[in-house]
Image: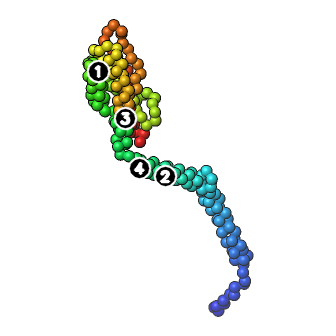
Amino acid sequence: MTGTVSKPKGPTALTRLLPVVTVLAALLYAGAAYYLLFVPKLGQIVGGGEFDTTAIRQQVSDTRSRLEALKEAFSAYSKLNPEHVQRLKRIVPDDADIPGLFVQIDNLARKRGMVLVSVDAVVDDKAASLVGVKPVRISVNIAGGDYERFRLLLSDIELSLRLFDVQSIVFTPTSENYSMLMNAYFLDKSFL
């Protein structure tokens, strides 16, 4: 047996087309990757998509402008006279201070020789009022004293440092009993 070695006969049709098939497969793979992976994410990145940063940039800009406004307000507050700030806190305190209201109304009535019969004060969350301020609804019954004393009491309430807003007055000319419905105000901490 003689061993014969056969010589390769040259490129076959399969080996000649292999580079073309490889390039076509790579192009097909790249095209499929583009349409299946990149195009769906592109919709999320461009205007209005899930990853669009325009809305976040606007929110950051709004937050920065609000921070600047707060800095300006704090700077203006720091320049206020401390005595004026304390006076303002007595006019419209930080809390309802219902016991303080009782004492103040009782002192005003005693000053005019009248007797405080009853006081009922409730924070009125439902009433519409100025932004940042909540009203305290106060119902007061006072006895003793003629109409002139009652008028002087109303004048004292008007001149008192705490802000009162008299809503209604009920009295009978023949009796010395008076009923008032009024509001006092305090700062709404949820607004701050």
Is there CB contact under 8 Å for labels 3 and 2? no
Q: CA distance from mark 4 to mark 2?
A: 17 Å
Within 10 Å of disc 3 (Cα), the crowding (few <14, some 14-19, many 20+) is some
Q: Is residue 51 visible?
A: no
In the rendered structure, which amino acid carries the disc numbered 3? Answer: Ile
Which residue position holds label 4?
A: 79
Q: Residues within 10 Å of mark 2 (few under 14, many from 20)?
A: few
Tell me the tag on residue 184.
none
Q: Nearer the viewer, mark 2 or mark 1?
A: 1
The earlier-in-sequence mark between 3 and 4 is: 4
Q: Which mark is residue 68?
A: 2
Q: Secondary structure beneath disc 4?
A: loop
For the view shown, which residue lies furthest in the bottom direction?
2
Crowd tier of the residue under label 4, counting other residues whose Cα lies within 10 Å: few below 14, some 14–19, many 20 or above: few
- Residue type highlighted by circle 4: Lys
Q: Of marks 4 and 2, which one's residue comes earlier in the chain?
A: 2
Image height of 95 relative to 22, above or below = above
- Distance from the alpha carbon under mark 3 to that under mark 4: 20 Å
How packed is label 1: few (under 14 Cα within 10 Å), some, or many (20 or more)?
A: some
In x, y percent, where is residue 59? 53, 51
Residue mark closest to the camera, 3 vs 2: 3
Residue highlighted by disc 3: 91
Q: Earlier in the sequence, mark 2 or mark 1?
A: 2
Q: Earlier in the sequence, mark 1 or mark 4?
A: 4
- Tell me where residue 165 appears, x and y as whole percent: 40, 26
Residue 169: quadrant of the picture: top left
Q: Position of residue 97 (x, y in %)?
A: 31, 33
Asked whether the beta carbons under mark 2 and mark 1 sit within 8 Å of each other, the answer is no
User: Label 2's element?
Assistant: helix
